[in-house]
Amino acid sequence: MTDDRLDPRINAFRDDLADIRLEGRVSAARHVEGAPYRVTRPAAPLRRRPADDAPLDTELLFGETVRLFETREDGWSWVQADLDTYVGYVPSAALQPVGEVPPTHRVPVPRTLVFPAPDIKRPPLFDLPMGALVTVTGSAEDHNARYSQIAPAGYIVEQHLEPVTAKAEDFVAVAERFLGVPYLWGGRTANGIDCTGLTQLALMMAGIATPRDSDMQERALGTRLAGIEALRRGDLVFWKGHVGIMLDGRNLLHANAFHMMTAIEPLETAIARISAKGLDVTGVRRLGAGTAG
């Protein structure tokens, strides 16, 4: 017996293994309680199958947490993201058990560098994407900048961090910072991003919980508008499998495979091009006041 209403994208169940919270709703050989783990890579791929060539469904950012249900001998772990409950396979090496000290800050810029010492002239250890979560343990400065020391090691310039409780005033302005970023199916960073990843990340920075896929976003976000007339900044326009953010009353901001990047174009141009493929606008949603400047 399996509840047909359960979406496998956001519910962890297989024939052999399932989340214990689904016991009684799905049939599985075992039901287990997920263990809390944290992502330790700048961006870890969450794939549909435990293989490097499997489709990329999304990316998990540094500091985000998951429930881990299975660690496999082939180097993959089956997990569910805490942020949006998405389920998939992540490289086991990208995870570690959640520690006692929670993140204190996040990265509000598209990309920042982590230095081995408080010195911008030193070769960086790695970079972190917007939305990455870190724990600040101290501070330092040199003649160039002030730095926040993060656990377990490294330094980030202070202006590239903000408290985890901060909320961007204008999510559209956040999305605009990704103009020109390459389109990547499943991407959530300035190295590559897709339409729903862009929308989710921008809204997340504004403190708005957002599902990962366009059909989920269309159901969950804002209120439905009757049509495309009188649109304004921050309205979301949906097609089957696609979403864009209105930059103003005429222009659409979206990560898309036609431009192969995040681009701005007139909404009527996007509608004509996508309609030529047999896909019409499925809905327009308006978020609450104060989310789009």
Image (cartoon, rainbow, N blue to C red):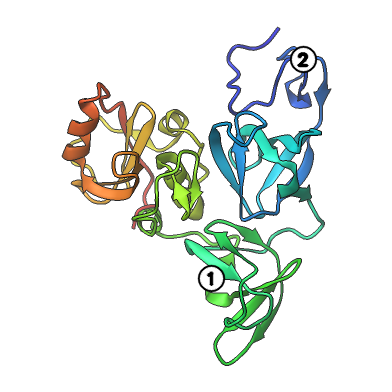
Q: Which mark is residue 193?
A: none
Residue 90 spot, x, y in % from top left? 67, 39
Q: Residue furthest bottom?
A: 143
> Disc 1 residue type?
His
Residue 288 spot, x, y in % from top left? 38, 45
Q: Quadrant of the N terminus?
A: top right
Work out whether residue 280 or residue 276 is closer to the camera in this orientation and state it. 276
Q: Is residue 56 above or below residue 280?
A: below
Work out whether residue 226 or residue 93 is closer to the camera in this orientation and state it. 93
Q: For mark 1, give the secondary structure.
A: helix
Residue 164 spot, x, y in % from top left? 60, 60
The residue at which mark 1 appears reads as 160
Q: Is residue 248 left or right of residue 215?
A: left
> Disc 2 residue type?
Ala
Q: Is residue 42 left or right of residue 35?
A: left
Q: Quadrant of the C terminus?
A: bottom left
Work out whether residue 213 or residue 249 is closer to the camera in this orientation and state it. 213
* Quarter-of-image position of residue 266: top left
At x 60% / y 29%, what residue is drawn?
48
The residue at which mark 2 appears reads as 28
Q: Does residue 190 appear in the picture of this structure?
A: yes
Q: Is residue 257 left or right of residue 61?
A: left
